[in-house]
Amino acid sequence: MIRRFFRLLGFLLVIGLVCFFFLAGKISDRMYNDVDKIDDFTISSRAEALHKTILVADLHADNLLWDRNPTKKIRYGHVDIPRLIEGNYAIQVFDAVIKTPKDLNYTSNNDRTDNIRLLAMANRWPFQTWFSLYERAIHQSHKLHKAANESSALEIIKSKSDLRYFMSRRKSNSYIVGGLLSVEGLHALEGDIENLTNLYDAGYRIMGLVHFFDNEIGGSSSGEEQGGLTDFGRRVVRWMEQKEIIIDLAHSSPALFDEVIQGATRPVIVSHTGVKGVFDSPRNLSDTQIRKIAENGGLIGIGFWAGAVGDLHPLSISKSIRYVVDLVGIDHVALGTDFDGAVVTGFDAANVIMLTEALIQEGFTDKEIRLIMGGNQVRFLMDNLPDD
């Protein structure tokens, strides 16, 4: 009887481990990256014709976090290379999520819990990633590079020359996507400034300073203290500017935002956000912050999730874009979907034509729509990526 009990216990343990390591990550992915389809939104013939002629570029998606091959199309989530091609994407920024807190919220989080550790284990990431934030960034870089090696449809862009070469190829081949690497929060440095060089060598050209909690760099809009830059953070920002790494102020506290933007010698971005003038959220930008980004020559990526724009309808996204354009002009607005960022959206990358239609209904011209959907992003990257 005791032997049977332990055999049953061992069997159940094996089943439990198999379920955890091969199913838990996929179940989480399906739960948190849902599409609540918008069925009552007609795409006009004008939108269909226009969308074929534009280049789509997105400043923020979290595809690398999940247990997927980016080159394979799946039936859930928001982003993979085949769906990007269907949506006529030219450029996708692939972001590396390093750590998120338990009971995540937009008002006050600490750094004492770590949701990504369990996900890293469930997704069978290398053992060192279970305990190292830096190794998680390195692993996600390896994942994108592996995908590019396996698929001729994905090219990784690290420099202006890479981008120029890619754009020249894209003119005659719309079945390729240029991918850039970004990291969401420099707690990935683990307090060691030398790791900046390592992340750069791993291909990261856009770096967010903070995520949902205060870190060694400074304050988050969702942190407990929400302060400005630390002394370490000031050293890091100076190094980033010298290396021509694009600084991402998404998730920054007002104090951190002001300190960085005041001292910035190069344009910055806010990769995925909304605007308080349309939807008042602690994550969203005030009019003053929008103006400061524009004065800096920077770019604001408008998100596609309800926490950024109020609800999931494409017209809510276009309304936030219109607000930025009316406030500071057409040159400073972009797409920052946050696809696959544990958010629900109204459509996936393959159906981004829905935003083209919404922008038409918002009254934008074809020229303006081309800039919003990708022209501004390509120009910004061409101006601000490293030369080599």
Image (spheres, rainbow, N blue to C red):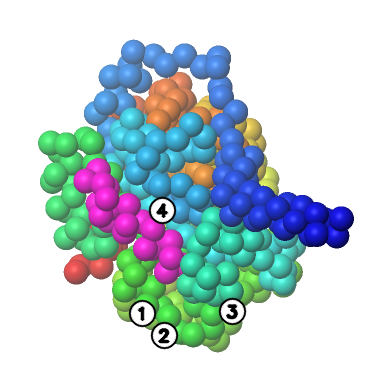
Q: Is residue 372 above or below residue 127?
A: above
Mark 4 vs mark 3, foreground winner is: 4
Q: Residue at label 1? A: 197
Q: Is residue 89 left or right of residue 351?
A: left
Query: In whole angstroms, how far apart are the C-alphas of marks 1 and 2?
Result: 6 Å
Q: Residue at label 4? A: 94
Q: Is residue 102 left or right of residue 249?
A: right
Q: Earlier in the sequence, mark 4 or mark 1?
A: 4
User: Residue 216 shows which numbered tag?
Assistant: 3
Q: Earlier in the sequence, mark 4 or mark 3?
A: 4
Q: Residue at label 2? A: 194
Query: In whole angstroms, how far apart are the C-alphas of marks 4 and 3?
Result: 23 Å
* Residue sitting at x 33%, y 30%: 86
Q: Of 358 and 159, which appears nearest the observer?
A: 159
Does the segment drawn in magenta span residue 153? Answer: yes
Mark 3 vs mark 2, foreground winner is: 2
Residue 93 location (% of width, % of height)? 38, 52
Query: In whole angstroms, how far apart are the C-alphas of marks 1 and 3?
Result: 17 Å
